[in-house]
Image (cartoon, rainbow, N blue to C red):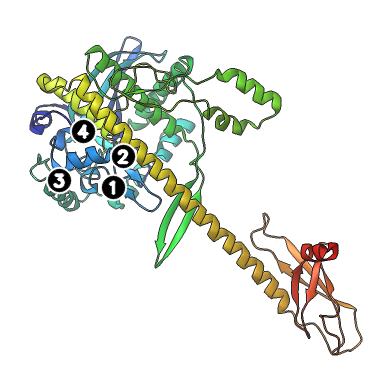
Amino acid sequence: AGGEMDPKDSIFNRDIHSSLAIAIDDVTTRHVDDAVSIGEKVGDGRWVHINIADPASVIPSASPVDVAAFQRTETLYGVEEAHFMIPDVLAAGVLSLSGEIPKIPSLTFSAIVHPDGTFSNPTIRPVLLTNVVRRTYESVDSWISEGRSAPDILNELGEMARSRHFATAGEERSSRAEEAMECLRGGVAVEAGGGNDAVSVNNERDVVLELWRIAKARRAYRKNKGALFLGIPKANIRLTREGDELAFNVGGSKERRLGDILVEELMVLAGEVCAQYCADHGLSVPFRVQQPPMVELAPLVSEYQQLGVPQEWWDFCLLQYMHTAGYSAVPGLHIGVGLAPYTRCTSPIRRYADVLVHRQLLSLLLAPERVLSEQSMAMCVEHVQKVSAEIRDRAQLEQRFIYLQWMKKELARIEETRKQQKSAVQGARLPNDGTAGDDTISGVLSLEGSEDNEAQVHVTASRLPPSHSLEDDASNVWVDGEPTGGVNGAGSEASVSDGEEEERAQEQ
């Protein structure tokens, strides 16, 4: 799974990166892969640093943890729980760029980004981060969209600190670090304790706004290079346990946020910087490649417009003409991101292909004799490609199965609601004392689950004498003034029958 390297060589002999690094994530994220920062201006450009978690330096090559990760190849996110590639005690502990330890190992991808979105001076170096802060997408969005400082950000940080994922208590950090070291079984002990309990936020907004400017330039650059931005919504299905029962939580894709675009563009930048650096140094890594579409997409879009196909369906239609992206030991074009060469290196906590990239880079920087050959890398890539495809297939099958179970439950719920509505009509006692009065009685039923929650069914039934059986004469049930069925039964009890059944009987 990689050359033998003493992790101490790549942890304790590295530079300190003290610039403010911002980790942008949801408040519930526990495995923090990345944190971004900016450097000084150079000419018309500015240094950008994408700091990535560095498990390749912490987890010894060929150790039990490394072998297990290589066999799994990536984290499997199930509908009920996640099956982590790297043990959670490590992924959420010493490996996470959460600011919970004073010096966090990182592999930093840097470049000078110019106003037109191009970059120069691609640089990769192992560092120790000492100034990491966590911010939510909501905070970043407020800065980008409103262009204002957020004076209440310290209060938000206080709320984060109350979450165990943003714990600042030295005791908890020390306990988690000790667990991590025990899990490593002889791995490198990273110092535990301390942290950035009092973080200055005076310039965070300026950093985010500058990164947003760079992200916009990069996105425009990739569009000009032919990148495809297909928005395919996905159903989000999760299972939670409520006692002995499983509860379904079904929703759509998350709404696109400005912070999502910012992080996405910076991660793609890191992938391009990494791939260019590897190509320049003749280093074989799992490059990410994707062939051009099977047909020209522009004429298809024009055809969809002429046929009146709803615009939200276009991406679904175009997707069938796209080749699946994959890994290759040699660089190539990735049409989806519009770049060549390109690789992924920003999620080593959950993708082993990214770990392979990191191991090759660390070998090149610290021990060139341990660099894997192209042939050896091709074998690793073949394994990762095969197992990753199996994991995706399994995840899709699980999603489909759970979705069908959810549909079954929903249909049963709808049927039960329908029975309750019928029972409400059954429970309505019809006057049978034979006294004079109106010819009909009426009631109102509310239908649950209607769009406006105000829909009502008006039920009208005939008044019958005591000796008259409802089996001999059916009264009409009226919905909004139209007869839909009959009221059948005996005595003064009533039940609703489906009008369609009566029509079929009449036809026969």
User: Which mark is in front, 3 or 4?
Assistant: 4
Residue holding disc 1:
166
Q: Is residue 29 above or below residue 376?
A: below
Residue holding disc 2:
134
Q: Nearer the viewer, residue 202 or 424?
A: 424
Query: How far separated are the C-alphas under marks 4 and 1?
Result: 20 Å
Query: How far separated are the C-alphas under marks 3 and 4?
Result: 19 Å
Query: How far separated are the C-alphas under marks 1 and 3?
Result: 14 Å
**Mark found first going from the N terminus, 2 or 4:** 4
**Residue 123's spot in the image, x, y percent?**
24, 18
- The quadrant in which residue 18 appears is top left
Residue name at image x 35 percent, y 22 percent: 269
Q: Amino acid at mark 3?
A: Gly
Residue holding disc 3:
193
**Mark found first going from the N terminus, 1 or 3:** 1
Which residue in the rendered view is the most extreme toward the front? 508
**Mark found first going from the N terminus, 4 or 1:** 4
For label 3, the SS is loop
**Mark found first going from the N terminus, 2 or 3:** 2
Residue name at image x 68 percent, y 75 percent: 423
Q: Amino acid at mark 4?
A: Asp
Do the numbered discs 1 and 2 sit on residues whose CB atoms are within 8 Å? yes
Question: Along the horizontal axis of the image, is 426 left or right of 104?
Answer: right
Do the numbered discs 1 and 3 sit on residues whose CB atoms are within 8 Å? no
